[in-house]
Amino acid sequence: MEKTAIIALGGNALSNKSQAGTINDQFSNTRKSLTEIIKFLKEEYNICITHGNGPQVGDELLRMDLTQGEVSPLPLGVCVAGTQGTIGYMIQQTFQNILNQEKIDKEVVTLVTQVVVDPKHPSLKNPTKFVGKRFTKQEAEKRAKNMGWIVKEQDPDEWRRVVPSPDPDFVMHGISIRTLVHAGIVVLAAGGGGIPVFINKDGKFEGIDAVIDKDLTAAKLGRVIRADEYYIVTDIDQVYLNYGTENQSPIDQMTDLEAKKYQEEGHFQQGSMWPKIRSAIYFLKHHGKKVIITNIDHLQDAIDGKAGTTIVKG
């Protein structure tokens, strides 16, 4: 029986924080990530892939800051659309090449995807989404002063720019995405959380400056396509309690109820693991059977239940 999976690649799966982030780096990382994903197709999954864009959209914003007065700036929402197309191109081309090499007769398509958000969402006034490169506190404060950035500390002595990040209300083009996925086509959709739009007073769609929470968009997209499984590919091998301390301990499996309890105890950082856990809880509440959180190196073992953290409904 065919299974359907939604796979969310973190932006860092494409742009490693230890690298310069050149286009060659990103193609190389994309190739590695997608080689690991091929196992889904060999096991007859229908798959939909979505991806983050934090490092890439941050770079786009930086380019605009550095060319002020020379090039007309673009709204943040348009930058999201641009990165969705650029990253979609990289993934689509790379994965199609891998499929051809493996003699797997499938097409890969990228769908530019808009996602409706609430224009009054509190995040629009209190930015929380980390984008772009990491800086020391001194470097970040200098850029905040010179370029008007809002910066926050993500990890110890690692500061990044933050931008508004409203929750997704509705993933557009759902019927098209579901039809393609269940026809056996590999679909790339809702990249970077989707292009943020809202419905104005005239009932028309209009862009808004934000980067939507990619993980929650992926969970909602999984509901739309009726996915059985949701794979969150991030930069750690599994979820930990007391992460980053001497007492950290891995979680091999937990229920959504246990995940809520751990969050209440303060184990999951708001700007890091908690959005992933929150999206997992949503997915399991609406149709999903299981969620697996792991990194790209352990993804194939995670499919077999031998790695990562598996979350199921309690």
Image (cartoon, rainbow, N blue to C red):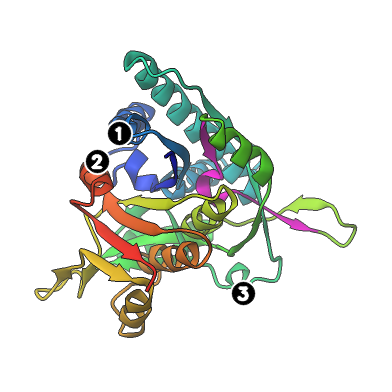
Residue 50 against residue 169 in the figure, above or below: above
Badge 1, how many Cα within 10 Å: few under 14, some, many 20+?
A: some
Q: Confirm or deny contact between disc 3 and disc 2 (CB under 8 A).
A: no
Image coordinates of residue 285 in percent, x first then y, are 50, 68
Instruction: Say which label, 3 or 1, has the lower sequence index.
Output: 1
Q: Which residue is pictured at 40% across the width and 72% down the height?
A: 270
**The stretch drawn in magenta includes residue 292:** no
Image coordinates of residue 71 in percent, x first then y, are 63, 36
Q: Which of marks 3 and 2 is in front?
A: 2
Residue 61 against residue 285 in the figure, above or below: above
Query: In the image, which disc is placed on residue 122?
Result: 3
Q: Is residue 173 left or right of residue 289?
A: right
Q: Which residue type carries mark 1? A: Lys
Q: Which residue is disc 2 drawn over? A: 300
Per the rendered image, the range of residues in magenta is 186-199
Q: Which residue is disc 1 drawn over? A: 39
- In the depicted view, which residue is nearer to us: 190 or 143? 190
Residue 259 against residue 34 in the figure, above or below: below
Image coordinates of residue 297 in percent, x first then y, are 21, 42
**The stretch drawn in magenta includes residue 195:** yes
Q: Furthest-left residue in view?
A: 246
Badge 2, how many Cα within 10 Å: few under 14, some, many 20+?
A: many
* Label 3 SS: helix
Q: Is residue 23 left or right of residue 205?
A: left
Instruction: Say which label, 2 or 1, has the lower sequence index.
Output: 1
Q: Furthest-right residue in view?
A: 202
